[in-house]
Image (tube, rainbow, N blue to C red):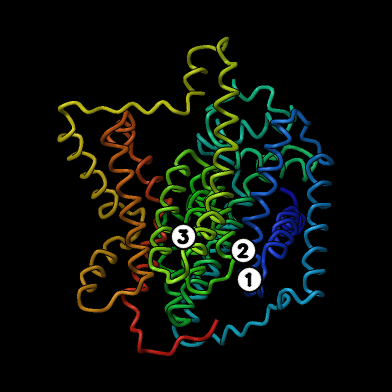
Amino acid sequence: MPPFPSLLLLHAPPLIFGFSLLTALSKEKLPPIFMCLALSYGLGTGLISLWMFVLGICHIPFHWTAINVPLYLFSILLYSFSLVRIKMNKHPGISFSKNPGRLAGASIVFAAFIVISSIGVFWAAFNIPILEWDAFSTHAFNAKVFFYEKTFAYLNSQPHANYPLHIPLMQAWLSTAFGSWNDQVIKTLFPFYFLSLLIIQYHFLIRHTTQPWSLLGLVLTISSPFLIYHATIGYRDFTLLFFNISAILLLLLWQEEKSGIYLISSSLFSGLSSFTKLEGGGYLLIHIILLTAILSRSQAPLREKSKSFLRFCIPAVGIFLLFHIYKYFSSGVSAALPPQAQESLDIYSLRIDLSGKLLARFGIVVNRFLYNLFLTNNWNIIWLMLLFSLLKIKKKACSFEVKLLFLALLLFFSIYLAGYVLTQHYYWVAETETVLSRSLLHFFPLAPILVILINFPGDETPRRPH
C-alpha cells in the first residue's frame, strides 16, 4: 500500500484544474474556501475524464504528457485570465474570509460523529482492495484496459461498452499519475467525492438553518449504512449521487444568491452525472425541470430567464451529447462483433411492455419500494422520519426550497416507478435485492435535507449571513 501522503498528492491535480476553472468562470466573489475545494474537486475530475474522452475519440494515446500537460497549461491560462480580470476591477476579486463559528453543545457530538465516520470511509477505501463484482469485472477492468492499451481501440468489445466512462477514465488517470496499475489506488477517488458531498450539503443547510441543525443534517445522511458502504467501494453509484445532489443544491443556491458560479457548476455537474451512469441522462432532464420551476418563479425579464436557461442547458446537454453521439456512431461499426457484444452496445434498447400484467407489476414494484425504504437497514430510519415530517407541512408555511426538493423527490420516484413497471428493467427490481437500493441511493440525501428543513424552527436563531 502506498504511503497516505503520496496518495493525497495524487488528488491535487483535480483540485488545481477545477479551481482554475472555478476562478475563470466566476464573475463574483468565490464561495468559502471549503466550498471552493468541494466544487473544484468535482469540476477537476470531470475536466480530466472529459479531456481523456476527447483524446480517445481523436486516437491520441493516454500518456501522462498528453493528458496532463495540456490540462496544466489550460489551468495556468484560466487562472491568469482571472487575475487579469481582478486587476481590471471587473469583479471584486477572490475572498475566502469565513467565520464558521465555534462548536458547542450538540454540535461537538455531531461533528465528532461526522469526523469518525469520514475517517472510517477513508480507511476502508484506502486499505480494502476492490472486492465487489461490478467494480472488479466492469469499471476497474475497463480502466485497466485504458491504462495498458492507452486507447479506445477495444472499447466496443469491453464489458458493458454502452456505459458512460467517467469512472473508468478517472481510474486509468489515477494509475497513470501513480506510474503503475494499483488496485488500491483506483479506489481512493470515492472518499473525496464523499467529503465533497458533505461540504456542499453543509454549505446549503447552513444558509437555511443553524450550525447544530446543519451538522445534524450531515449526521442523518451518513447514518445510512448503504451510503457509507458505497462511499468505500468502486461502484459508480456514489459518484452519480455526488453529481446529482450537488447539481440540485447548486441550483437552489443560485436562485438564492444569483451567483453565476453556482449555475454553471450545477450545469457541469448535471452533465457529468450523464457521463457517470446511463441514469444520469434522466437526471439531467429532472434538473432542467427544476430549473424551469425556479425560472417560472423569478421576476427577472424573459430575456434574462432565457439566458440563464441556456447557460445551464448548453454545457449540461453538450456533455450528454458528446458521449451519446460518439457511442451511436461507434456502435455502427460493430456488426462483426458477437451478438452479446452488439446487444451491450445498444444504448437505446428500452422495451416498453403495455401488456395486461401492468397492474400486477405495479403492485409488486410498489411493494418492493416500500420494503426497501422502511424495512431494510439500508437507510436507517430516515425515510420514516421524512414521512412523519411531511405530515407537518400543512401546519407550517413551506419554503420554496422545501417545495422544490420535494418536487425533485417525486420526479425521481416517478421515473423509477415508470421504468421498472413499463420496461424490461422490471426484472431487476422483482428478482434482485440490490439494484433498487442503488437507484434510491442516487437521491437519498434529499430525504435528510428535507427532514432538517421541515423540522427546523425558523424562529430559533437568526440565520447567519453567507
Pointer 3: residues within 10 angstroms few (<14), some, or many (20+)? many
Circle 1: element type? helix
Q: Is residue 462 left or right of residue 271?
A: left
Q: What percent of the width, then of the height, locates residue 444?
A: 39, 56
- Earlier sequence position, callout 3 versus callout 2: 2
Q: Is residue 88 left or right of residue 406?
A: right
Do labels 2 and 1 touch, CB within 8 Å? Answer: yes
Tag shown at residue 87: none
Identify the residue under disc 2.
38
Q: Is residue 357 left or right of residue 418?
A: left
Q: What percent of the width, then of the height, locates residue 14?
A: 71, 54
Circle 3: residue type = Ile
Identify the residue under disc 3.
248
Circle 2: element type? helix
- Earlier sequence position, callout 3 versus callout 1: 1
Circle 2: residue type = Ala
Q: Residue at x 47, y 68 (%)?
A: 301
Do labels 3 and 1 touch, CB within 8 Å? Answer: no
Tag shown at residue 34: 1
